[in-house]
């Protein structure tokens, strides 16, 4: 971590936790994390957002796990940016590999989703990362570069406060396999360099880049020691308040 960037740890609950249990888990997380100098974000399923909107204060914010790029209309099953804003949601996770895999059109929708969020002042946690075969072919950097080039193709101006990047190698998500802190740091430096070339050094220096993929309390500290790793996007380990708070503490600097 670099002291000039505030640490950021997000809980991605995915399709877990019943609505009736969500407020309690979020309160436990908030209490266990205490008042640390870390931005903590919880991304529950859509159904929980309105129940949780009153919990958000201080360093805590709510995120959604996806969004549609249109504001309103005949899009059954979708949720829009104005709807999320109306519920005090501050962040949206975009481009998660589980969504990219389930919907092969997702990659092509991302430029419009990124624009819709940023235009409405909604921050994004943009996910990228390579599958196992690409890592085995030592093609991981080219793969991530292509994702960045394609998904940010319509973005003219970068906003380092509103854009958080999460590097999540697909082979490490939910598998118990974590990229080594060196592998993660190397990719984060590569992404930072990509931002610098396209949007300037200041944005590259200021943008927070999270690592995701089997982050646990036992590996958080080691990841946090790396210059380019500014936090984590945590799936499985975010469902237990104590375990998640230890990860947050690992990144407190
Ligand atoms: P995991 O998930 O921590 O369970 O590997 C991370 C993610 O998919 O965001």
Image: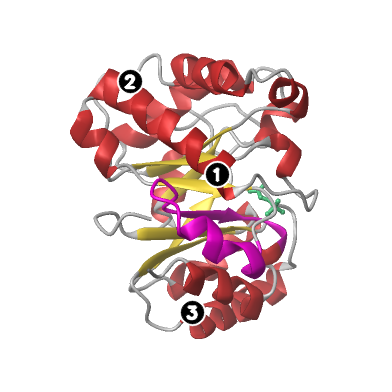
Is residue 8 inside the magenta stretch?
no
- The local secondary structure at tag 2 comes to loop
Badge 2 density bin: few <14, some 14–19, many ≥20, Cα 10 Å: some
Residue at coordinates 47% horizontally, 59% vertically from top-left? 224
Residue at coordinates 50% horizontally, 85% vertically from top-left? 31
- The local secondary structure at tag 1 comes to helix
- Contact check, label 1 and label 3, Cβ < 8 Å: no
Badge 3 density bin: few <14, some 14–19, many ≥20, Cα 10 Å: many
Residue occupied by mark 1: 182
Residue 238 visible? The answer is no
Residue 198 visible? The answer is yes
- Contact check, label 1 and label 2, Cβ < 8 Å: no
Question: What percent of the width, then of the height, locates residue 46?
Answer: 61, 53
Task: Tell me the magenta residue range.
Answer: 216-236
Cα–Cα gap, marks 1 and 2: 30 Å
The tag on residue 33 is 3
Up the image or down, 244 lies above or below 162; here it is below
Task: Give 218 or 45, whichever is nearer the viewer.
Answer: 218
Looking at the image, residue 78 sits to the left or right of residue 114; the answer is: right
Q: Quadrant of residue 235?
A: bottom right
Residue occupied by mark 2: 155
Mark 1 against mark 3, which lies toward the viewer?
A: 1
Task: Give 11 or 214, whichever is nearer the viewer.
Answer: 214
Mark 2 lies within 8 Å of ligand 1 (Cβ measured): no
| Precedes in sequence: disc 1 or disc 3 | 3
| Precedes in sequence: disc 2 or disc 3 | 3
Task: Give 215 or 16, whichever is nearer the viewer.
Answer: 215
């Amino acid at each position: 971590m670099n002291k000039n960037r505030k640490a950021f740890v997000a809980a991605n609950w995915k399709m877990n936790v019943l609505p009736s249990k969500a407020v309690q888990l979020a309160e436990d997380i908030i209490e266990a994390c205490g008042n640390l100098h870390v931005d903590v974000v919880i991304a529950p399923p859509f159904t929980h957002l309105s129940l949780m909107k009153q919990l958000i204060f201080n360093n805590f914010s709510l995120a959604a796990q996806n969004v549609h790029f249109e504001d309103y209309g005949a899009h059954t099953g979708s949720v829009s940016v104005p709807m999320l804003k109306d519920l005090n949601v501050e962040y949206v996770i975009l481009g998660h590999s589980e969504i990219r895999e389930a919907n092969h059109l997702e990659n092509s929708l991302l430029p419009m989703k990124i624009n819709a969020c940023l235009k409405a002042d909604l921050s994004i946690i943009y996910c990228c990362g390579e599958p196992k075969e690409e890592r085995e072919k030592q093609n991981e950097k080219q793969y991530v570069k292509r994702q960045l080039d394609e998904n940010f193709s319509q973005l003219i101006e970068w906003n380092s406060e509103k854009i958080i990047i999460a590097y999540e190698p697909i082979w490490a998500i939910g598998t118990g396999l974590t990229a080594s802190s060196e592998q993660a740091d190397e990719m984060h430096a590569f992404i930072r360099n990509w931002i610098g070339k396209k949007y300037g050094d200041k944005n590259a220096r200021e943008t927070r880049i999270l690592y995701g993929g089997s982050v646990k309390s036992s590996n958080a500290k080691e990841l946090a020691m790396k210059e380019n790793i500014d936090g984590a996007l945590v799936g499985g380990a975010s469902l237990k308040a104590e375990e998640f708070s230890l990860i947050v503490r690992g990144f407190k600097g």
